[in-house]
Image (cartoon, rainbow, N blue to C red):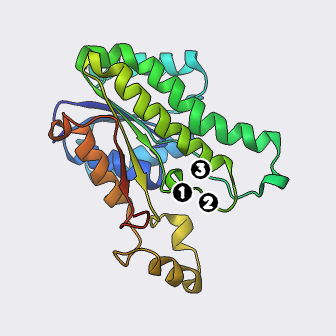
Amino acid sequence: MLKGKVAIVTGGTRGIGFAIVQKFLENGAKVALLGSKSETVEKAIAELKGQNSSYEVIGFYPNLTKEEEVKDIFKKVEESFGSIDILVNNAGVSSRTKLEDYTEEEYDKVSDLNIKSVFVCSKIVIPYLKKTKGVILNTSSMVSIYGQPSGVMYPASKFAVNGMTKSLSRELAPFGIRVNAVAPGVIETDMVKNLPEEMIKPLIQTIPLGRIGSPEDIANAFLFLASDMANYITGVVLSVDGAATN
């Protein structure tokens, strides 16, 4: 579905991001995965190459809030693979701190990674996507729809991601660039796997489909939105949550 396409995936070393990278590679894309440090990037690439030595995948670890660093990396991706067709803004950090306990440092950390990095990467990729009529895909969250009881900056940041998604879809449509987001529900990441059964069972009961989602469930949604099958879809925040927010 993505044969001949080149994708950049931020936060691509684990969890949902790693599943997206896998899915894109399986479907013929060349992928640059971005992580927070060299060790995690190298480990992810080694695992992918172990799965299939023919995968065309490279990795970098820039500060995603610094325009010059991102600009340098995107240039290297184009030099390595010839173009950039897809940007997945997946890097992010969650928060559960109550408002009265919030520090400025935590506020800045969540805001920088979840909002500013999406802004910076989207800005830098535009010249490349104008040439390829490409796609920007953002990772939102089910809490962007109805919030959460603590950690206010996490849902606030995902509300911001939804706003950027919808606004940029209008701004970039004249250039043939599509912009969409995926809002995952409760997904079986390492953190969820480690929760005790007495916490998991009540959680599952809130999901009409009766199960927790897998990273592959989310990666499939990204694959569809990245592909030409979705070439008339833009400005959408797609909920993939087993109807938990319906």
**Element type at marker 3?**
helix
Residue 198 placed where, x, y %?
Answer: 58, 86
Q: CA distance from mark 2 to mark 1?
A: 7 Å
Q: Can you say whether 126 is above or below 30 in the image?
A: above
Residue 121 placed where, x, y %?
Answer: 48, 26
Label 1 Cα crowd, 10 Å radius (few <14 / some 14-19 / many 20+): few
Residue 48 placed where, x, y %?
Answer: 34, 49
Residue type indicated by callout 1: Tyr
What residue is pinned by disc 1? Answer: 146
Give the camera-side residue of 240 and 44. 240
Q: Can you say whether 17 is above or below 86 in the image?
A: below
* Quadrant position of residue 226: top left
Residue at 49 percent across and 42 percent down: it is: 11
Left or right of 86? Residue 115 is: right
Is the Cβ of the residue at disc 3 closer than 8 Å to that at disc 2?
yes
Is the Cβ of the residue at disc 2 closer than 8 Å to that at disc 1?
no
Give the camera-side residue of 162 and 93. 162
* Quadrant position of residue 133: top left
**Element type at marker 1?**
helix
Query: Which quadrant: the N terminus?
Result: top left
Residue type indicated by callout 3: Pro
Is the Cβ of the residue at disc 1 closer than 8 Å to that at disc 3?
no
Q: CA distance from mark 3 to mark 2?
A: 7 Å
Q: CA distance from mark 1 to mark 3?
A: 8 Å
Compare marks 1 and 3 and give the one earlier in the sequence. Answer: 1
Left or right of 25? Residue 97 is: right
Residue at 58 percent across and 39 percent down: it is: 114
2 vs 1, front mark: 1
Residue at 52 percent across and 50 percent down: it is: 144
What residue is pinned by disc 3? Answer: 155
- What number is the disc on residue 131? none
- What number is the disc on residue 148? 2
